[in-house]
Amino acid sequence: YVAVARRLTANLPTEEEQFRAIFRWVCEHLEYAEGNHTTNPGQLLKYGKAVCIGYATLLKEMCTEAGLECEIVTGRARNEPEDIGKRLKKLELHAWNAIKLGGNWFITDATWASGFFDKKTKKFTHVFKETYFIGNPEYFSRNHFPEEKKWQLQDKKVSRYKFVHRPIVWSGYDSLKLTGVAGRAKRFTFVALPLKLGVKQKTATEIKPVAFSYDPETSAYAPVVISKPDGNTKIRLPMFKRGSRYVTLFVSDKPVATYKVRVWGKDPDKIEARREERKKKKERRKKK
């Protein structure tokens, strides 16, 4: 790994270019495999299989050989809708990195950037995801919770409570330059219908069309979208089938966030029909 790191970075003038060369090499030459917890760089190169700590360790060692300052960050991570609302200690243990470039620290995750691991088939697919290379700290803080809060790299730190109850965000959240997704209540596990979301934008990104996806058994209604002059968007989405549901917000055909909501089974159309019927009865009584 020493020879590889030096060869990869020998003719690259900037720290960012050097780091990208090492990062891409690690992502392409390691394959996620459950059970392989070795942190020995030689073993990692020999077998090419590792879990997150292996990715993080090899990246750190290669960066060190290239003269780049890199640290391993450990903590908890969320990457599935079922993780919403779980206690922190029940979430997956994870390892990623912090890299210092041009005097500033950045968060990076080679494991998540390298591809997808199917837990059912135990197969790994290489698909590079740029989102996790020198990532946006605000985006990372939604799915990564470091043991040392300093590695959130934000002035306003995210609490444990807020972290576990936030919606899960996906790549569209970062690529569309969104800075927040909000709802009717802070604890999304107890949101009553209709669901109201606010999407606050950092840039004048086109947010239409807005769509939602549910489980197949849930009745789907087109959302009512209300745009405001301040750049916020409010969305009303009626859901009628009683029980807990996972609702994924899509913006411009890109997945942005998944919410866990509790639906009380109230049909607004039926409620309105009953109101109209009571109103008619009242009018008939007045006529009599």
Image: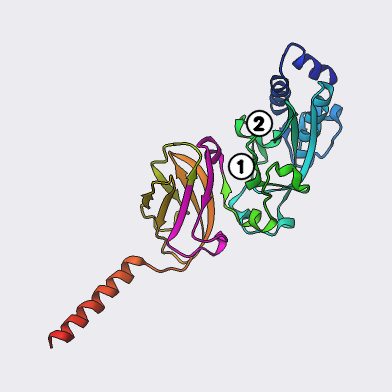
Residue type (three-letter) at the residue carrying disc 2: Phe
| Distance Cα–Cα, label 1 vs label 2 | 12 Å
**Badge 1 is on which residue?**
139
Residue 211 at what x, y percent from top left? 41, 47
Is 10 left or right of 200, judged from the image as shown? right
Determine whether the residue tagged by mark 1 lies in a helix, strand or loop: helix
Residue at the far bottom: name it: 288
Residue type (three-letter) at the residue carrying disc 1: Tyr
Location of the C terminus by quadrant is: bottom left
Q: Does the magenta stretch include residue 164?
A: no
Residue 232 at what x, y percent from top left? 44, 48
Residue that appears at 28% across and 74% down? 275
**Badge 2 is on which residue?**
133
Give the magenta-colored segment's residue range.
Answer: 170-199
Location of the N terminus by quadrant is: top right
Residue that appears at 66% across and 31% down? 133
- Against 187, residue 122 (above or below) is above
The tag earlier along the polypeptide, 1 or 2, is 2
Q: Is residue 193 magenta?
A: yes
Residue 33 at what x, y percent from top left? 74, 38
Residue sitting nearer the eye, 89 or 176: 176
